[in-house]
Amino acid sequence: MPTHEVFNQVPPITPFDFSRNPALIEGLHREGAGWAEPEVRELGALAGGVEAQEWGRVAEGNPPVLHTHDRYGNRIDEVEFHPYWHRLMDVAVTHGLHGAPWLDERPSAHTARAAKFYTWGTADPGHMCPISMTYAVVPALRHNPELSARYEPLLGSRTYDFGLREPSTKAGLIAGMSMTEKQGGSDVRANTTTATPRSDGGYTVVGHKWFTSAPMSDMFLTLAQAPGGLSCFLLPRVLPDGTRNALRLQRLKDKLGNKSNASSEIEYDNAVGWLVGQEGAGVKTIIEMVNMTRLDCVIGSATGMRSGVVQAVHHARYREAFGAKLIDQPAMRNVLADLVIESDAATTVMMRLAGATDRAANDPAEASLRRIALAVTKYWVCKRAPVHAAEALECLGGNGYVEESGMPRLYREAPLSSIWEGSGNVAALDALRAMGRQPETVEAYFNEVALARGGNHYLDDAIDRLGKELTDLGDIEYRARRVVELMALVLQGAQLVRHGHAAIADAFCASRFGGDWGIAFGTLPVGVDTAAILERAYVD
């Protein structure tokens, strides 16, 4: 019953255009993929539309269900997804967010794909996991030319073909990855799964995997101990003779977030697999896949930051408190501007990494830069995502704590990328390992950031400070996070000084390097051009 007039309510943000993002579109053109802007724009409008947002919300609220047996007691090991999951997957595959860039001869195809992955990810991050793995499996699979020739065209096909059938009979394939085990986690060399050669050239695989996401994928790369050491294998769900491979789904994980996607524990009960790469070179082979999924971890975290800040800014533009719009309150402007700066920095460096991925095959310097820059950026951007999501949620107050706002879903999702493909310590130590084993990566890194010298004195000082940090090798592993954090910030600052909006670049360097920045968001120094910065987050 109406008892009084209700006012001061924020209108729904949907529909909105998620591609209305200057840092994204500028980076797309800068890295040579401007030709993809129409499709990025199309996906942006679709991702922020009422229908796609509903697909994501409902798929997240109706998690997959595991059916180990059919009604007659036959083992089937099938996962049932909500129909909206399949709609999300169909859009992603149709627009080439999976393996398509490997078959695309247009320039900067991986950069175009990164922008589209970023844009569509705001509809639902969960289904982006199998899309990412399908993208990442291709370079690893190329270590076996026969398997690559057979399956790569299907991994890049823009037809989403869900269902358990022999891979070569399908119109398109989705791929997954199984690496970690109960006793080892990130220490994959502690794996106990075994692979025994068969007379037909395949291997019999016995063991378990503690995390296997998207278990209804058509095929998986996995690690197992072969006679020649830890090796990489391809295991299809359905064998060439049409029978189901012995991949037993034991249970699905009850996760913090990423609810729309299934993650399982899996047993290989004399499953059949084929060697990818050489025996004993399993880590070297599968690291090709890991590096590509690490790029997607950065993209996914950047997507989450952008999603959170546009929601926060939208709320603040319409909500009033203490006689003024929230966005006009000085303390709130500080918070929102800081969130926008963090988001723009993540997006800008993400696009640089995507560009390096395109150029790495033919440019050793870009390959070296990508090696070190991806490690440090994966550590920092993914580490920043959860605190960014928490602050964006808080901008909505109690409304942000309610599920209907969508902010709790964003918050639950945020820690995932920091865990996936190596937690913070693994990523930080990997960066140190790269510098130690491949000194050319250090040279490539400093050549890159040196291009911004002279553009901001705070950044120049930070580059000098970083150089001193890296000459001191004492307790370097103990200091790993501090060193890698500074490397990531310097790289972001260099990209913003060279390519970003002047107000963003100045505020980033003054706060992150100038010593006038607190621990929480919203502690920017006085004098920041908040008006210009906040405009970057308007999507309507």
Image (cartoon, helix red, strand yellow):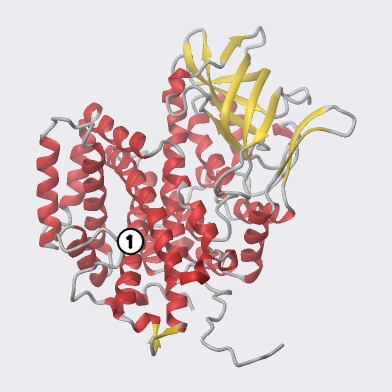
Q: Is residue 455 left or right of residue 145?
A: left
Which corner quadrant holds the N terminus?
A: bottom right
Binning the other alpha carbons within 10 Å of mark 1 as few (below 14), some (14 to 19) or many (20 upward) gives many
* Residue 2 percent location from the top left of the image: 68, 90
Q: Amino acid at mark 1?
A: Glu
Using the image as rendered, state which of residue 525 and residue 54 is in the foreground.
525
Using the image as rendered, state which of residue 332 and residue 494 is in the foreground.
332
Q: Is residue 107 visible?
A: no
Using the image as rendered, state which of residue 198 and residue 123 is in the foreground.
123
Q: Is residue 233 above or below residue 415?
A: above
Identify which residue is drawn at 46% across, 21% down.
282
Q: Is residue 301 left or right of residue 508?
A: right
* Residue 79 percent location from the top left of the image: 72, 40
Label 1's element? Answer: helix
Identify which residue is drawn at 28% across, 39% down.
372
Identify which residue is drawn at 23% across, 70% down.
502
Q: Is residue 505 left or right of residue 83?
A: left
Q: Which residue is mark 1?
A: 342
Q: Quadrant of residue 193?
A: top right
Residue ranking furthest to the front? 3
* Residue 400 percent location from the top left of the image: 50, 68
Q: Is residue 319 above or below residue 423?
A: below
* Residue 169 percent location from the top left of the image: 74, 35
- Callout count: 1
Q: Is residue 84 visible?
A: yes
Using the image as rendered, state which of residue 433 and residue 273 is in the foreground.
433
